[in-house]
C-alpha cells in the first residue's frame, strides 16, 4: 500500500514532514523565547549605591531589611573594595580613566547592594521601599546613607523589553499553532486523496465480504508509516534548521544556542513529533476509509 | 430462502423504487427479475445484500431479518452471497488468479486451500489457461467469468447477478448463462436481474416481472414479456 501508490505516498510524507517540522520549530522557538525571557528577567536588577561615608554595619542592616521583603529573591552586597575592583576590571582598556583613578588616591566608589526581585513587575515596589527608606532616615535627622537607586533610569527600558518579549512569545505561539493546524488539515486531505485512489479496491473488498477491520488495517498501517517516516525526516531537517537560526540570531540576545538545545532535547522532541505524526496519519486514514465503508 | 414481505423503498425526493413487493425465493431456485430500467430490479438485489434499507416491510434470509443484522456481522452475511455485476468490478492490479484468491483471503481461508481451490474454480468457468492474465488482457466475457469464479469461490448459498450479460455479445452472453445454469445445477440458488429477452427465453426458469416498483407477474416457467 505504502510503496504501491508511490507519488501519492511521497506527497503525503512530504506534507506531513512540513507539518511536523513546523511543530518542531514551534516547540523549539517557544523554548528559545522562554529561555531568552528568563535570561532577560535575570539580567534586570536594582542597584542601590551608597555614599562612600556609609558604614558597612548600616548597609548590612539595610540589606537584612531588604531581604525581609517578600518580593526580593536575593541581595548581593558589594563592598567598596569589590566595587573598585569590578570598576577597574570593566575599564581595563581605558588607560586615561585608570590613571585619573590612581591620581585620586582614595577609592571614590561607594558600596553597592544589588537587589533581584522574584518577578520583574515587583521592582517598582522595591524601589519605592528604598526611596521611602531614604526619606525616613532623613526625617530622623540622620544623613541618608543611600546615594542613588538606579531603578528609575532603567524602568522604561526594562518594562518595554519585557512586554515586547511577552507579546512575541504569545504571538509566535499563536501563529505556530495556526500553522500547525493548517498544515495538519492539508495532510489529512492528502492522505484522504491517497485513499480515494483505492476506493475501487475498498468497494471490491466490501463486495466479497471483507470485515471492516480487514479493510481498514492496511490503510491505517500506511498512515502510521507516513507519520513515522515524516517524523524522522522532520527530526533530521530540524538540525540544519536550528543550526542556521542560531547562526543568524547569534548577534541577538547574546546568542542562545538552539543547536545544543535541540540536541540535548532531541529524544523528547522526536517523541512528540513521532506521536503527532502517527496520530495524524492514523486519524486521517481512519476517517478517509470510513467514508468509503459506509453502508 | 429469501422472503420479501410488503417491501417498499421511497427515496428522499419521494420517488418510489419499490412498492409493496412480496415474493419468496426457494432454496436452489433460479429466479430472474425482468423489467425496464428503474423498475426496481437493482433495488431488490441491493436489499438482499443489505446495501439498501427498506422504507417499509421486511426482508428475511432464512429466518433472519436482513436489515436487523448488526453492522459488524454484515461482512459475514455477505460472504454467504456471491455477487456479479455488469461492470465486472475486478481489481485491475491483480491477475485472474489473484482476484479470485483475494475473496478467499478476505474470508480468512488458509493458503493451501486457496492454492488448490482457485485453479479448480477457474477451470469450472473455463479460464484455466488464463489464470495469470490481468483483467485488461482478458475479453469482457472472460472478465465476467473471473468475476463469477470470485463470487462462487467461497461456496455461497446464493449467487446474485445484476445484469451480468449487459456488456457482452450474444456468444459470450450464452456462455455466461450456461455457467450460471451449471452453478444452479450444482446446488446454488441464483438470483438474476436482466432485461435480455434471449437469456430469459433460453433459461425457461421462474421469472418475476417488475414495473414501476411493483410485481407485475410471477411465472414459474416464464417467458420475457413486457
Image (cartoon, coloured by chain):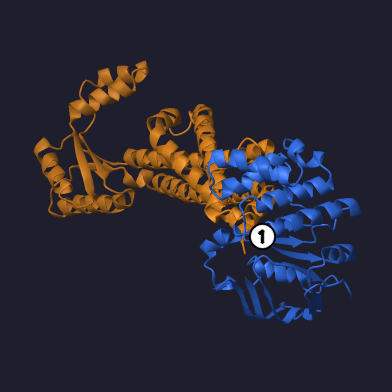
Chain colours: A orange, B blue
Give the image location of residue B100, x and y in percent. 67, 45
Mark 1 crowdedness (10 Å alpha carbons): few <14, some 14-19, many ≥20: many
Give the image location of residue A146, x and y in percent. 21, 43
- Quarter of the image with the N terminus of chain A in it: top right
The answer to whether residue A178 of the structure is visible from this angle is no
Mark count:
1
Q: In which quarter of the view is residue A207 placed?
A: bottom right
Residue beneath the point at 40% across and 49% down: A159
Q: In which quarter of the view is residue B201 placed?
A: bottom right
Residue beneath the point at 82% across and 67% down: B204
- Quarter of the image with the C terminus of chain A in it: bottom right
Give the image location of residue B26, x and y in percent. 66, 71
Left/right of residue B145 with respect to residue B170 in the rendered view: left
Give the image location of residue A161, x and y in percent. 43, 45
Left/right of residue A21 with respect to residue A261 in the rendered view: right
Residue beneath the point at 46% across and 40% down: A274
Give the labeled residue for mark 1.
B188
Left/right of residue A147 with respect to residue A275 in the rendered view: left
Question: In terms of depth relative to the viewer, which is nearer, A186 or B104?
Answer: B104
Left/right of residue B158 with respect to residue A86 in the rendered view: right
Q: In which quarter of the view is residue B111 placed?
A: top right
Above or below, comparing residue B77 to residue A253 in the picture: below
Question: In terms of depth relative to the viewer, which is nearer, B174 or A83?
Answer: B174
Q: Secondary structure at mark 1?
A: loop
Chain ID for label 1? B
Amino acid at each position: 500500500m505504502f510503496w504501491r501508490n508511490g507519488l501519492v505516498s511521497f506527497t503525503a510524507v512530504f506534507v506531513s514532514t512540513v507539518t511536523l517540522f513546523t511543530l518542531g520549530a514551534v516547540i523549539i522557538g517557544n523554548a528559545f523565547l522562554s529561555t531568552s525571557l528568563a535570561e532577560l528577567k535575570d539580567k534586570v536588577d536594582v542597584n542601590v549605591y551608597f555614599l562612600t561615608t556609609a558604614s558597612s554595619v548600616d548597609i548590612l542592616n539595610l540589606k537584612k531589611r531588604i531581604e525581609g521583603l517578600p518580593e526580593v529573591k536575593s541581595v548581593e552586597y558589594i563592598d567598596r573594595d569589590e566595587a573598585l575592583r569590578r570598576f577597574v576590571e570593566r575599564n581595563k582598556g581605558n588607560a586615561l580613566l585608570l590613571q585619573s583613578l590612581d591620581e585620586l588616591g582614595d577609592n571614590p566608589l561607594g558600596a553597592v547592594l544589588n537587589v533581584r526581585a522574584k518577578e520583574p513587575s515587583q521592582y517598582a515596589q522595591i524601589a519605592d521601599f528604598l526611596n521611602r527608606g531614604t526619606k525616613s532616615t532623613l526625617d530622623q535627622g540622620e544623613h541618608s546613607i543611600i546615594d542613588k537607586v538606579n531603578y528609575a533610569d532603567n524602568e522604561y527600558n526594562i518594562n518595554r523589553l519585557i512586554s515586547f518579549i511577552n507579546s512575541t512569545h504569545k504571538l509566535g505561539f499563536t501563529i505556530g499553532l495556526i500553522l500547525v493546524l493548517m498544515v495538519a488539515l492539508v495532510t489529512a486531505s492528502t492522505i484522504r486523496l491517497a485513499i480515494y485512489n483505492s476506493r475501487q479496491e475498498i468497494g471490491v473488498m466490501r463486495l466479497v465480504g471483507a470485515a471492516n477491520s480487514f479493510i481498514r488495517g492496511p490503510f491505517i498501517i500506511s498512515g502510521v508509516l507516513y507519520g513515522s517516516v515524516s517524523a524522522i525526516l522532520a527530526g533530521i531537517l530540524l538540525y540544519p534548521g536550528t543550526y542556521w537560526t542560531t547562526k543568524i540570531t547569534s548577534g541577538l540576545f547574546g546568542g542562545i544556542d538552539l543547536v545544543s538545545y535541540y540536541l540535548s532535547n532531541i529524544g523528547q522532541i522526536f517523541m512528540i513529533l513521532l506521536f503527532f505524526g502517527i496520530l495524524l496519519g492514523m486519524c486521517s486514514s481512519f476517517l478517509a476509509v470510513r467514508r468509503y465503508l459506509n453502508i | 430462502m429469501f422472503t420479501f414481505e410488503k417491501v417498499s423503498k421511497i427515496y428522499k425526493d419521494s420517488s418510489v423504487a419499490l412498492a409493496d413487493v412480496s415474493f419468496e425465493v426457494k432454496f436452489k431456485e433460479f429466479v430472474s427479475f425482468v423489467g425496464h430500467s428503474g423498475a426496481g430490479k437493482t433495488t431488490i438485489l441491493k436489499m438482499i445484500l443489505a446495501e439498501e434499507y427498506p422504507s417499509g416491510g421486511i426482508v428475511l434470509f432464512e429466518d433472519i431479518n436482513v436489515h436487523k443484522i448488526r453492522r459488524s456481522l454484515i461482512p459475514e452475511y455477505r460472504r454467504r452471497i456471491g455477487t456479479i455485476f455488469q461492470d465486472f468490478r475486478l481489481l485491475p492490479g491483480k491477475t485472474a488468479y489473484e482476484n479470485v484468491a483475494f475473496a478467499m483471503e478476505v474470508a480468512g481461508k488458509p493458503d493451501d486451500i486457496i492454492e488448490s481451490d482457485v485453479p479448480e474454480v477457474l477451470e469450472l468457468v473455463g479460464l484455466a489457461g488464463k489464470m495469470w492474465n490481468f483483467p485488461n488482457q482478458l475479453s469482457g466475457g472472460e472478465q465476467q467469468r473471473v468475476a463469477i469464479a470470485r463470487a462462487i469461490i467461497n461456496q455461497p448459498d446464493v449467487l446474485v447477478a445484476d445484469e451480468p450479460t449487459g456488456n457482452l455479445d450474444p456468444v459470450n452472453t450464452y456462455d455466461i448463462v450456461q455457467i450460471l445454469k451449471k452453478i444452479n445445477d450444482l446446488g446454488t440458488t441464483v438470483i438474476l436481474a436482466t432485461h435480455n429477452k434471449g437469456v430469459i427465453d433460453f433459461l425457461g426458469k421462474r421469472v418475476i416481472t417488475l414495473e414501476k416498483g411493483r410485481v407485475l407477474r410471477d411465472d414459474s416457467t416464464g417467458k420475457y414479456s413486457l
